Image: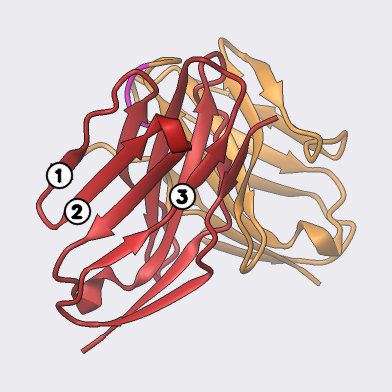
Amino acid sequence: EPEVTQTPSHQVTQMGQEVILRCVPISNHLYFYWYRQILGQKVEFLVSFYNNEISEKSEIFDDQFSVERPDGSNFTLKIRSTKLEDSAMYFCASSLGLNTGELFFGEGSRLTVL
Amino acid sequence: AQKVTQAQTEISVVEKEDVTLDCVYETRDTTYYLFWYKQPPSGELVFLIRRNSFDEQNEISGRYSWNFQKSTSSFNFTITASQVVDSAVYFCALSGGTSYGKLTFGQGTILTVHP
C-alpha cells in the first residue's frame, strides 16, 4: 500500500538552528500538508500546498516556517530559527484531490529543540 | 470558526467491553467532512473513516461503527468487543467544504483496554 514517508524520524537541535523536515508524499497525490502535534496536545494544521504554492496556512505558520517542493517527489518544511516551543511531532500528509480521497499521514518527525 | 469537542479525555475499559467515543462539532459550512483517526503508542495517525455532511447513514466496519447525527452535530465512534490492541488515542476531526485538507482536530480521547 502506498504511504507517505518522513525523515528524520527524530531530530534534536539547538535553539536558533535551522531544521528541514522531509516528506515524500504518495506519488500521484496533488495536495500536501504539514501538521504538528505538541506532546500530549491535539494535532494542529500548519499549511497546505498545491501546484507549487501555499494554498492555506494557519496563524502558527509564521515567517520562521517555509515549505518547498524542490523536486517531483519531496516536500519539505523548514524552520529557520528554531525555538523551544517548536518542539513537537510534525506530520506530513497528502491527498489525491481537494474533496476526494482520504488524507494520508506519514509517521511523523519528532523535533526536540534544546 | 470550526470546533471539535471530545469531552472524554480518557476512557478505561476491560477487554470485550463495548466503548463509545463521543465527538461534537461546530461549523458554519453546509458541506463538511468528519473524520476519525487512531494514534497508537507508536505515534502515527491512522485513518479510520471519512464522512461527508450529506451522508448520515451509519457505518459499520468489523468491530467499529460510527453514528453521525446532524441534528445534534455529533459523530460518535463505537468499538464493539474491545481488544487490547485498540488502546490508542482517538481523534475526531472536521474539515470545511472548501478546505478539505485543513482538518480541525479534537483534543483526542485516550482509550486504554485492559486484558
Dot 2, crowdedness within 10 Å: few (<14), some or many (≥20)? some
Give the distance between the C-alpha atoms of the residues marked 1 and 2, in whole angstroms: 6 Å
Give the distance between the C-alpha atoms of the residues marked 2 and 3, in whole angstroms: 15 Å
Q: Which residues are magenta?
A: A100-104
Chain A painted colour:
orange
Of all chains in the rendering, the one displayed in red is B
Q: Is residue A80 above or below residue B39?
A: above
User: Residue A1's quadrant in the figure?
Assistant: top left
Q: Earlier in the sequence, mark 2 or mark 3?
A: 3
> Front-most of A5 and A38?
A38
Residue B60 - label: 1
* Residue A58 x/y as whole percent: 74, 32
Residue A28 left/right relative to B61: right
- State the residue position of label 2: B64
Q: Residue at x 88, y 34 (%)?
A: A63
| Label 2 in the same subunit as label 3 | yes
Magenta span: predominant SS is loop
Amino acid bearing label 3: Cys
Q: Residue at x 21, y 49 (%)?
A: B65
> Front-most of A30 and B17?
B17
User: Residue B18's quadrant in the figure?
Assistant: bottom left
Dot 3, crowdedness within 10 Å: few (<14), some or many (≥20)? many
* Residue B113 x/y as whole percent: 29, 80
- Dot 2: what SS? strand
- State the residue position of label 3: B23
Amino acid bearing label 1: Ile
- Dot 1: what SS? strand
Nearer the observer, disc 2 or disc 3?
3
The stretch drawn in magenta includes residue A94: no
Residue at the far left in the pictured view: B62
